[in-house]
Amino acid sequence: MRTTAQNHGLRRLTTLLLLVAVIVYMNGCGGGDSAGKTASSAPSAPNTQQAADLATAQKAYAGTPRTPAGFYADLAPIGVTGTVATMHLKNSDLAGAPVGAAAFELCNDDMAQATAWSEGKSTFMGSYADLVDVTGNARYWELTRVPRADFSARLRHRVFKCSYVNRSGLDPATDSGPAGTLNLRPLDAASIKELTEYLWHFTVFNNADHVVLDSAAGTAPSGSLAHVITMARLTRAAISGDCDRIDVLRWTHTADTVTGALSRQLDTLQTIRARRVAGTAELCSF
C-alpha cells in the first residue's frame, strides 16, 4: 500500500525524468544545428593555386623587371648612349662555312684568332665598324667596334674561350639537347648558374612578353649539377578583349661534374589564361 508521500515522490521523480529527457532531446537537436551552422558559416580556404596564377599573370603583363634580383646582368658599356649590339661569333659567320650546317658559338683561346674572326663580321648598320678595343676575361674575348655610320653605337663581338666552354655540337636555334662542354674547373653550382643565366641573355626569352620568375639550383642525377630558370611567356590574343595565353616554362641546364658535358631541356609546366582589365590582371575561367 502506497502512502501519499510516496505518491508525491513518484510524481516528482516522473516529472524530473521527463524534464531531463526534454533537455537531452533539445540539446541533441541544438547540437546538430550548431554544427551545421559552424560548417556552413566557416570561410572557404583560399585557392593558393589561383593566387599563384594571378601573381604570375601580373608579372607577365608588367614585363619589368624581366629578371629577379641576383640574376646575371650583361650591362652596356659605360657612357655609351647609342645602340649596343652584342653577339657571339658562330661557325656560320666564317668564310666558307657549310650552308645549312647547325650554327654554334665559336671558342678559341687565341686572341689573334678571335680578332681575325671579328674582322670577317665587321659590317654593322650598313657600314664598316672599326675595331677600337679588345678585352678578355676568364670566359670570353670581347672585341668592340664602332660603326662609321653612327659613332654613338657599339658592336660587341664575343668569342668564348675553349678553356671555359666549348659549344660545338649544339644548335642554338633549339632550346633542348646537347649544350656543349663546360671546361671550367672547379665545376660547382655557382659556375653552372652563371653560365645558364648568361646564355639566357642570348635567347628569344630575353625579349618583350617574357619574364623570369625564378632562377635556382635544380635536381640532377648523381654526378651532375643542374640549374633551372623558370619563366613566363605571354602570347597575346589576336582579338582585343579575348583571353591571352601565359605559358610557364622551365629551362634546365645540366652538367656532368666529371666531363663537363652540358645538356638543356625546355618544359612547359602549365598554361594560364588571363586578360588585362584596366591595367590589372584577371584570370579567365573556362
Image (cartoon, rainbow, N blue to C red):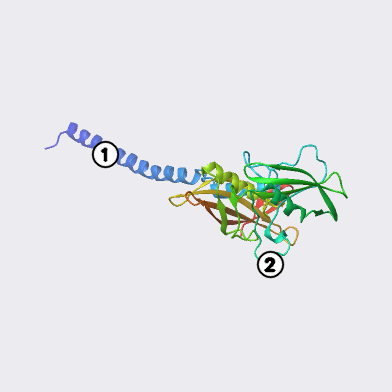
- Where does the image place residue 58, in percent across and percent down from the top left? 66, 47
- Which quadrant of the figure contains the N terminus? top left
Dot 1 surroundings within 10 Å: few (below 14), some, or many (20 or more)? few
Does the rendering let one see residue 140? yes
Compared across the picture, whether 134 is left or right of 254 comes to right
Tell me the residue that label 1 is attached to.
17
Tell me the residue that label 2 is attached to.
98
- Where does the image place residue 70, in percent across and percent down from the top left? 62, 39
Q: Residue at x 85, y 44 (%)?
A: 152
Q: Earlier in the sequence, mark 1 or mark 2?
A: 1
Is 85 in front, or is 128? 128
Say which element carries label 2: loop
Q: How far apart are labels 1 and 2 at the CA level?
A: 104 Å
Can you say whether 265 is above or below 82 in the image?
Answer: below
| Extreme residue in the left direction | 1
Is 257 in front, or is 234? 257
Q: In which quadrant of the rendered view does residue 180 lie? A: bottom right
Is 215 in front, or is 19? 215
| Extreme residue in the top direction | 5
Say which element carries label 1: helix
Q: Residue at x 82, y 50 (%)?
A: 129
Frontmost of labels 1 and 2 is 2
